[in-house]
Amino acid sequence: MHDGRLEWLRWRWPRVLAVAVFLLGGVAFANIMLHDASRRHEETRSRVSELNMLLHEESSLLWKTLADRNSPVAVGREQGSIRARERAILDTLRGVGDLGTQIREYHLVLDQELGLLGVGKTSEARALELQETDPRFGRLNVALQHLEAAAADDALRANEVANLAMGTAMAAAVAAIGILLFRFEREHRATQRAGEELLHQQRIALDTLAEHEALVRHQASHDPLTGLPNRRALTALLEPGGGHQALLLVDLDNFKPVNDRLGHAAGDELLIAVAGRLIAAAGPQDTVVRLGGDEFAVVVAAGDLGSAVGVAKNVVAAVAEPFAVAGAQLRIGASVGVAVGDGGVDGTQLLREADQAMYRIKQAGKGGFEVYRRNSLAAA
């Protein structure tokens, strides 16, 4: 629910902007349509005015041609041309009521009047004009004036509505855009603050990740029980290409009976105590490693035989002292194999040689140390 609300808020103002643009487009379209309607009303007014002029011309045509001694045929021909233009205008007009009927009745009276004039009955033609032609023309003129005035009013009204709508829309658009800009600026600042907070959280996450990775690397290279470097770390410590280095391989004597008699918890406590004594027995630059089970190793930093033998003696003596474990005094021992590189022995061979020396001392009765000689093994 919370995520959905955030999503709606994120898209609220873009939607408002889209609606504003849509409304502006609608108002612009309506404005165009209103102006178009105004133009059509103006055209209607112009056509009605032209129609009125044609009817005036047709009304005066009969007596004008009579005064100029034109024949009824010539008058009829000119009258037909005028009426054709009148019909063309009437065809373009819509919503003019019975205007067409009134014009046709007016034409019938004009035709009667023209017929009387054609046979020389001037007085009768004048009487017909007074009785029929002039009243009908007066009514037509009034109707046309009303139509012309209505068309002019419609055109003016359409223009006014269009202008008002456009002005209102522009004012509303300016106000909406101002509000949107204000909101966008506020959202932008909020986004900046959120971005800064996100960067801060990312830095914290990266620091946490770095700490986690360091912890993982430490756990991958260290024994979880004693905290000592493990076999993998020993492989990295021993020089793969050979060098002046010394290695002690330490195997605890009589450790299994402790596990069998007192349990694994006591065995773990004993291993932790042994690790502490090995660290104390080694030099400050030396590295104590737990290989697994009851096996340990010491990498002697000095790398010479004398230093290695000195550390081996310390280890044997330290492990020989009794341990207070699980409320009991326990005695165990250590068998130590010593191997010293001479610059041409790599780490794998050095480990193998130390293992062989340790195996030899265990076969000889356990407890003590032995140095691996490449030509022979010398016990100490």
Image (cartoon, rainbow, N blue to C red):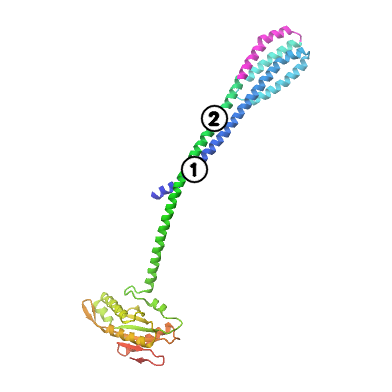
Q: Is residue 312 visible?
A: yes
Say what amino acid the circle numbered 2 marks.
Val
Q: Position of residue 8 (x, y in %)?
A: 43, 46
Q: Position of residue 274 (x, y in %)?
A: 29, 79
Q: Earlier in the sequence, mark 1 or mark 2?
A: 1
Q: Is residue 98 visible?
A: no
Question: In the image shown, does 30 or 194 lie closer to the viewer?
Answer: 194
Q: Which residue is mark 1?
A: 17
Residue neighbourhood size for the residue with mark 2, other residues' Cα within 10 Å, grouped as few (<14), some (14–19), many (≥20): some
Name the image quarter holding residue 87: top right
Magenta stretch? Answer: 119-145
Residue 48 lies, with reference to residue 355, above or below; the image says: above
Residue 46 lies, with reference to residue 111, above or below; the image says: below
Q: Is residue 122 left or right of residue 135?
A: right
The residue most toward the top is 123
Residue under the image location 70 percent in, 18 percent down: 57
Q: Position of residue 52 (x, y in %)?
A: 66, 19
Kindly report the distance in space between the C-alpha atoms of the residues bearing marks 1 and 2: 25 Å
Whether residues under marks 1 and 2 lie with C-beta atoms below 8 angstroms apart, the answer is no
The local secondary structure at tag 1 comes to helix
Q: How many marks?
A: 2
SS assignment for the magenta stretch, majority: helix
Q: Which residue is mark 2?
A: 161
Residue neighbourhood size for the residue with mark 1, other residues' Cα within 10 Å, grouped as few (<14), some (14–19), many (≥20): some
Residue 143 colored in magenta in the image: yes
Residue 38 lies, with reference to residue 145, above or below; the image says: below
Residue under the image location 28 percent in, 85 percent down: 317
Residue 130 colored in magenta in the image: yes
Question: In the image shown, does 267 or 347 lie closer to the viewer?
Answer: 347
Say what amino acid the circle numbered 1 marks.
Leu
Residue under the image location 70 percent in, 23 percent down: 85
